[in-house]
Image (cartoon, rainbow, N blue to C red):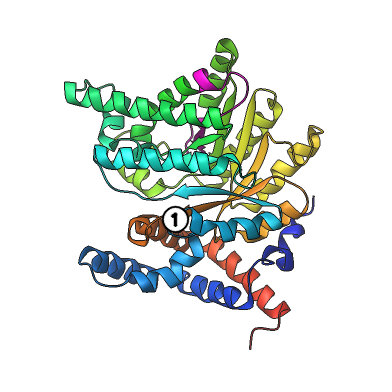
Amino acid sequence: MDKNIFNNTEVAFAVKSDAELEKAYWLFKMIKSEPLVKLGTGVTKFALKHHFPVEAIIKTTVFDHFCGGVTEKDTLNIVDKLYQKGVYSILDYSVEGAENDATFDATLQKNLELIAFAKDRPEIPFAVFKPTGMGRFVIYEKVTAGQALTDAEQKEWDRIKQRYDILSKAAKAADVPLMIDAEETWMQAAADDLVEEIMAKYNTEKPIVFNTLQLYRKDRLPYLKALHQRARDKGFKIGMKLVRGAYMEKERERAKAMGYEDPICVNKKATDDNYNATQAYMVEHIEDMTIYSGTHNEDSALYLTELIQKYNLKKNDKRIWFGQLYGMSDHITFNLAKLGYNTSKYIPFGPVKDVMPYLIRRAEENTSVAGQTNRELELLSAERKRRKLHK
C-alpha cells in the first residue's frame, strides 16, 4: 500500500469543523515551541497547586483537543462522530497520582462502570486501565525487585491482585476485552507476572485480558516469545497492545544513576525495527494472539497493513487493531478506517484537574518529538489550504 494514503487530509479531518481545524492548527503551533510548553506547563502546575482558577482556560484549549470530556457520557458525541467514519473509541479514565485504597477502589468502580458502559456499544470495543490505578507504585516496585513485603504491604499486594481479578472477570462476563497499560521497567515485571496469571485464567477461549509491550525496551520481543511458549503449554491466548513507550528519559537517567544497563534501544531505528519485528511475530502467530498496534508512526502502520496482506488476512480481522491517541495522527486513523481496517482512538476523560498530568505529558512528548508536531502542522496546513481557510 502506498504511504501517500496518509496524505489525504479531507478524510483525515472530515469530522473537524472549520473552527476545530483552526483551533488544532494554532494549538500545535504553540506546542511546537519548547520554551512556551515549558513555561506553560510550569505555570499550569503552579496555578493548579495553588488553586488558581485556570481550569476554564485549560478546558477550552488542550483539554478539549486531547480529551473527550469530564465523564464517559460527555464522550458520546465524539464517539458517535468517529463511529460514523468507521473509527472505534476506547475510553481511558485518565486520573493519575492518588495513592490510597479509597482512590484505588474508586478507580476500580469507575472501570467496572466503563466495562458495563461498553458492553452494549459496539463502537467501544475495549476497556483499559493503568497498573498504578489499582495500587501503589512502590508495591509493584518491591515485588519486581524480589524484596520481602511487610504484612501490611502483602495485604496491599493481595488487594491489587483482587482488583485485577474483579475487572478481568467483569470483562469476560461482558465480552469486553480489557487492556492493561505498561509503566516503568522497575515496576513492570510484577505487573507482567500478574497479567500473565490473569490471562491464564480468563483467556482460555480468546484474548480478553491484554498486556502492553513498550518496544523501546530491548527485552520485549524475547519476553513475548517466551510468554507465547508458556501460553501454548498452559492453553491460553495472548492479547497484546504494542506501543513504543513513554518513559525513555526517566529510564535512561535511572539506569545511569544506578549503574545498570540501559534497558532502552540504542536509537530510534532500533526501536522502530523492534516494533516492526514484534508486529511480524504476532501476525505470524495470529492463531494464538490478538494485536493492538498503538502507533503514531506511519511506517509501522503501513507495515502492519503489508503483514495483513502477506498472510492473506481480512482487513477487518478482529485479531488485528490499529490505534492512535485522540487529538493526534488523524491522518493515520481515518485513512486506515476508510480502507476498512479496524482503527480506534484512545479517548482520555476525567475531571480537568485530575487529567492534567496526562495533558502535560502529551504536550511535553509532542514538543520532544519534533517530527510529530511538524507532521501534524503540515497536514493541518494542507487541509486549511484545501478549505481555503488560511490567509
Which element carries disc 1, helix, strand or loop?
Answer: loop
Please say if 370 is above or below 325: below
Residue that sits furthest to the right in the current view: 312
| Residue visible at 73% across and 68% down in the picture | 10
Residue that sits furthest to the bottom in the current view: 391
| Residue visible at 69% across and 80% down in the picture | 385
Q: Residue 161 appears at what percent x and percent y?
A: 36, 25
Q: Residue 195 appears at what percent x and percent y?
A: 45, 26
Residue 203 belongs to the span the image colors magenta: yes
Q: Is residue 281 visible?
A: yes
Provide the residue designation for mark 1: 71
Residue that sits furthest to the top in the current view: 233
Magenta stretch in the rendered image = 199-220
User: How dense is the environment of label 1, judged by Cα within 10 Å: few (below 14), some, or many (20 and up)?
Assistant: some
Q: Is residue 214 left or right of residue 312?
A: left
Please say if 322 is above or below 197: below
Residue 25 sits in which quadrant? bottom right
| Residue visible at 62% across and 24% down in the picture | 206
Along the line of sight, which residue is nearer the eye, 233 or 353?
353
